Image (tube, coloured by chain):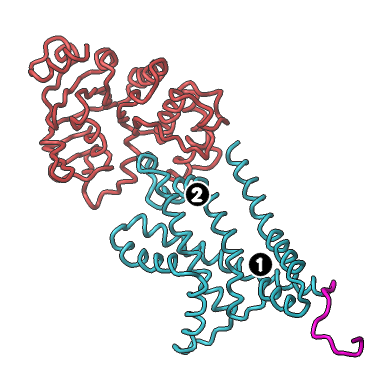
Chain colours: A red, B cyan
Amino acid sequence: MIEIKQLHKYFGALHVLQGIDLNVSKGEVLSIIGSSGSGKSTLLYCINGLEEIQKGQVVVDGTTVHDKKTDINKLRQRLGMVFQQWNSFPHLTALENVALAPKIVKKVSRDQAKSIAEKQLKHVGLGDKLDVYPSALSGGQQQRLAIARALAMEPEYMLFDEATSALDPELVGEVLDTMRLLAEEGMTMICVTHEMGFARDVSDRVAYFHQGVMEEVGPPEQIFGAPQSVHTQKFLANVR
Amino acid sequence: MSNSASFFSDFQISDLLFLGEAAGRTLGISTVSITIGTALGCVFGWALQESKWFAQATIGTILDIFRSVPLIIQLILFYNFFPIIGWKMGPFAAGAFVLSIYTAALVANVVRGGIDAVGTPMRRAARSLGMSYWQDLRYVVWPIGLRAVFPSWVGVALSVIKDSALVSVLGYLELLRASQILITRTQEPFIILACAGAFYFALSYPLSKYSKKLEEGWAS
């Protein structure tokens, strides 16, 4: 379970997250929507400790993320993350991209890392691209490679930070399909997204962020059907 | 006239050997300087990138001085300065010392550029997989950054091979110094400088060629 308690985050004078309280249970799919600069992505960075926080707590399965005593590298193995930019390692083949972290972080054998990588690449539909370098892959394929790379660490949770927003429109579908597949398999997911269709169809709950505040959270039917907050109503009216 | 003594003698084949030996010394001092300079430059460049304020104020300032003052002045100053503080250094050691620091100053900036080229998002992606800071540096930043700045590093290395000619002012018998000696004896500057140029080319060309091959390998 991920527990976020009274989380405050500043970038200089800018109060980016203003007291966020949110719990995400095992097996749940939570989508976070909201306009740019509302703090959605920053929240994900705070969850896996890529950003420092100024007040509050993020607790993952009982471990406090920003506690100095926490082995953050170990904790991050439980939290797979996929970014807006896919960030494939350009000097490694698809297989090596996925096998790298299991080999050096989890210290599994070379053969084992290779078989994990093969399995995960097949999982995301890149079974025929094992020896291809990222430069020869499309944006959608590179994003699926990034998903496979995160899955290779066998995380308990997956955090998606606008995983489709840097993609050409025709490539969005294949990445969303992969994310849907993971959701169906029971992966716990927090997805910051601008894909309202995905948020509505796949999520168990949807949270709406506005200027660093979580305005509203609830089942998709409620958020999309009968939003309570004026800001949510305005935002949804604009994106529809 | 035939009975008078001549101060000059013609360029001979054995002179080529003399130039060849001197080219070997040029190669030696360049290799030592490039190796030490690159190793130091990597550390300095990393420090400049990671601790911007402190490293810039300390290492950055020193390296700026080495990059800005003409190499020939540095060589003469250090060569004459070492005995004052009690270090007995021959022309090779003094020359290699100054060339190494000079190389380090140039390489530090190249390395800093390489780390910059990798970018925060890529490093965050690596860290998000559970890699430690050093693993990120070793398996992600180093190989990606190295490829990005390798051509610049080759440029530095080639220029250091040529700049090593300046060590001749310390009396070190490298290629340029040997050429000057031969010119004085033979009064054939054209032939000798052409030969010296050919030796410099022979030293630099393989590095340039090999680096291109490496780059092509990375690109495919």
Front-most of residues B207 and A97: B207
Residue type marked 1: Leu
Horizontal relation, residue B163 to residue A155: left or right = right
**Chain part drawn in magenta:** B1-14
Secondary structure character of the magenta stretch overall: loop
How many marks do you count on the picture?
Answer: 2
Quick one: which residue is furthest to the front in this view?
B1
Q: Quadrant of residue A139?
A: top left
In the picture of the structure, the residue carrying the numbered disc 2 is B149
Horizontal and vertical percent position of residue A105: 42, 45
Horizontal relation, residue A10 to residue B41: left or right = left
Q: Earlier in the sequence, mark 2 or mark 1?
A: 1
**Residue found at x 22% / y 15%:** A239
**Residue found at x 19% / y 39%:** A58
How many residues crowd mark 2 within 10 Å: few (<14), some (14–19), many (20+)? some
Are the two marked residues, 2 and 1, in contact with CB atoms closer than 8 angstroms? Answer: no
Please determine whether, in this image, residue B150 is positioned above or below residue B176.
Answer: above
Residue type marked 2: Val
In the picture of the structure, the residue carrying the numbered disc 1 is B27
Image quadrant holding the N terminus of chain B, namely bottom right
Quick one: which residue is furthest to the right in this view?
B2
How many residues crowd mark 1 within 10 Å: few (<14), some (14–19), many (20+)? some
- Is residue B108 inside the magenta stretch? no
Horizontal and vertical percent position of residue B199: 72, 63
Please determine whether, in this image, residue B178 is positioned above or below residue A9.
Answer: below
Please determine whether, in this image, residue B88 is positioned above or below residue A170.
Answer: below
Q: Dot 2: what SS?
A: helix
Q: Dot 1: what SS?
A: helix
Horizontal relation, residue A238 to residue B141: left or right = left
Q: Chain of mark 2?
A: B
